Image (spheres, rainbow, N blue to C red):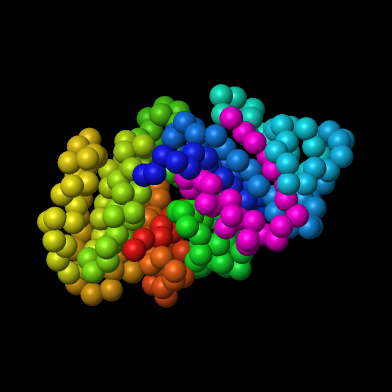
Amino acid sequence: MSTDTRTITVGIDGSRSSLDAADWAAREAQRRQLPLRLLHAGTEPAVSGGVFDIDDIDDNDVPAGRTRAALDRAAIELSYAHPALDIIARRTATPAVPALLAAAVEAETLVLGTRGRTGSAGFPVGSVALGVAARADRPVVLVRAGELPEDERVPVVDGSPPSTAPYLPVVLGLDPDASADDLIGYAFDTAAVRSAPLHVVHPWTLPTSTLRPWRHRFPGTTVREHRVDGDPGPRLLEASARAGLLVVGRRTGRGPGRAARSLIRHAGCPVAVVPHD
């Protein structure tokens, strides 16, 4: 992964989904020992909250916990939950999609919420989330409402704290025809940061040369390959129900394909959309 962009950035709009996404982003920033940047974009104010009362600040970094909006309440809550985390809350009047795309350029990962719906076979994904995931220059992780810290870990059965349980696998959907070093590198790096196994699902036969250099680069990561004859979508969807993160790719300059959009809507875990050549 590139080291010239060193923040985890999350879009905040006051919705439950965006707050759960912020919680996920805080955990990711802590895992990677990176600053967390909270960004509220657009002319509509975030939901009011009555914490502190200072003038609204536009296009400026503000200390976490100083203002009265949901953006700042989120920063306060996250600072209590992650006291060692460097948190910056920022508000801009720039419309959401261009503001988030600009923020993605300066971020290692951009995190956005989707509008989850409990008990549904699928859930709606907002136009902002899809628009940004289709055009961002960096990986975009989509997190639906209701995602909890324990959801990314192996279920606890002995009464020990959930935070001490091992992480669930990272699942990578890989097209053998794509030149996808950025995609593969992101999946291996993410699995290594979590000390999690990596499950690679791909159609037909994957050349051994595709994963060999990454296995050497990440010798501590357990890798399992799952070959699927035909459409890998159903297998990826099944695997996502037992995964901490699903990683899919899209060609640079193109949005996610139909299969990737279906996985974004129906996956049982957060989905990372990674641009690649």
**Which residue appears at 78% of the width and 58% of the height?**
43
Quarter-of-image position of residue 129? bottom right
Residue 223 as seen in the image, left or right of residue 159: left
**Which residue appears at 17% of the width and 69% of the height?**
204
Instruction: Tell which of 14 and 10 is nearer to you.
Output: 10
Instruction: Tell which of 7 and 256 is nearer to you.
Output: 7
Quarter-of-image position of residue 22? top right
| Quadrant the N terminus occupies | top left
Residue 245 as seen in the image, left or right of residue 61: left
Residue 66 as seen in the image, left or right of residue 170: right
Quarter-of-image position of residue 237? bottom left
Residue farthest left in this picture: 208
Coordinates of residue 14 in the picture (x, y in percent)? 71, 50
Q: Is residue 19 visible?
A: yes
The magenta segment: 86-110
Q: Is residue 181 above or below residue 162?
A: below
Q: Is residue 262 visible?
A: no
Coordinates of residue 214 in the picture (x, y in percent)? 22, 46
Coordinates of residue 250 in the picture (x, y in percent)? 39, 65
**Which residue appears at 47% of the width and 31% of the height?**
33
Instruction: Tell which of 129 and 125 is nearer to you.
Output: 129
107 part of magenta stretch:
yes
Coordinates of residue 235 in the picture (x, y in percent)? 30, 65
**Which residue appears at 25% of the width and 55% of the height?**
200
Residue 253 as seen in the image, left or right of residue 198: right
| Quadrant the C terminus occupies | bottom left
